[in-house]
Every structure is written in structure tokens, then in C-alpha cells.
Image (cartoon, rainbow, N blue to C red):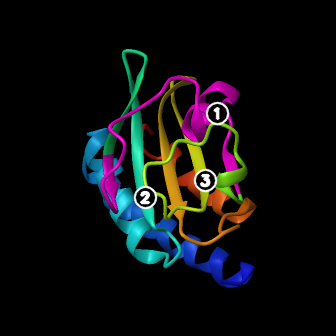
Amino acid sequence: MDKIRKENRYKRILNQIKKLIPKTTDPIAKMSTIAAILHHKFDYFFWTGFYRLIDGELIVSCYQGGVACLILTKHIGVCWAAIDEEKTQIVPDVHKFDGHIVCDSRSTSEIVVPIFKDNVIVAVLDVDSKELDSFDEIDAKYLEKIVRMIFS
């Protein structure tokens, strides 16, 4: 997908989410809606979901796609890198990411966005693709805007 088309699609999705999620204060309902919308609006989103940080464990939450790893090994993999570094991780080829956790061997690229509540990371948005180099700064920019709406 070219960059202009991608950006325009994200703008439409952002507006759609802005209209839907204020109907509840429940963050799980918001995450469920966000995962469903994103997963079905982008062909290259193979697995789309959230992992929540609960009592020091990163546990799968709302998602779309194949069966997920239930709990991710601490401080290993892309999701934990997003938490440990407190920033979005864009991985063009997961096979070249040291410590990548394989939940589905068909995934080849990934983006993970940390989610903050009161300046503390409480979850991550994790998106996988079956294609190499699927994610870029446009994805990061808009996914970061989208996850900020969960606790606003």
C-alpha cells in the first residue's frame, strides 16, 4: 500500500474509532473494538491485538487472528522491548530480531506500540504481518494516536 493511501485510510479509521469508543469507559471494550477495526481494515494485519501488563506478566487480551501466546516470557521479544524501551518497536523481519517469541511461524514483520495510563505502561498493541517490512512510521504515528484514546 502506498504511503498516501495508507495515511488516508488511517485518518478514516481514526475518525471511526473516535466516534465509537466514547460510548464506554471500559478499556477492554475499547481494545476489542480497536482490534476488530484495525484487523479488518488492513489486508497486511495478520494478527492484531493487545497484551496487558498484569502483576508483572504480559498476558494476551483482546485480539483478532489465530491463537496467541497466552503469557509472554519476561523481557524477551518485541512486546517486552516496547515496554522496556518505552517506545514503539517496528521490526521489518522478526527472524532477525534477537529473542523474537514465535506465537505463529507465519508472522514475518511486527509493530508493537506501548499503551500508557498516567505515564505508566499498562499494555501494548501488537500487530503482526505475514509480509516482510509491512510497518513504517505512518503505522507508528497513527497506532500511537489510536491507543492514546483507550484511557482518555
The residue labelled by disc 2 is 48
Picture layout, residue 102 above or below residue 75? below
Picture mark count = 3
Q: What residue type is labelled 3?
A: Ile
The magenta segment is: 62-91
- Residue 4 falls left or right of residue 143: right
Q: Can residue 25 be seen in this view?
A: no
Label ID, residue 104: none
| Circles 3 and 1 in contact, beta carbons < 8 Å | no
The x and y percentages for residue 116 are 53, 31
Q: Give the mark, 1 or 2, whose residue is nearer the N terminus.
A: 2
Task: Identify which residue, 83 or 132, lies in the foreground.
Answer: 132
Q: Quick check: is 83 in the magenta stretch? A: yes
Q: Quadrant of the C terminus?
A: top left
The x and y percentages for residue 125 are 49, 47
The residue labelled by disc 3 is 111
Q: In which quarter of the image is the N terminus?
A: bottom right
The residue labelled by disc 1 is 81
Task: Identify which residue, 98 or 128, lies in the foreground.
Answer: 98
The quadrant in which residue 138 appears is bottom right
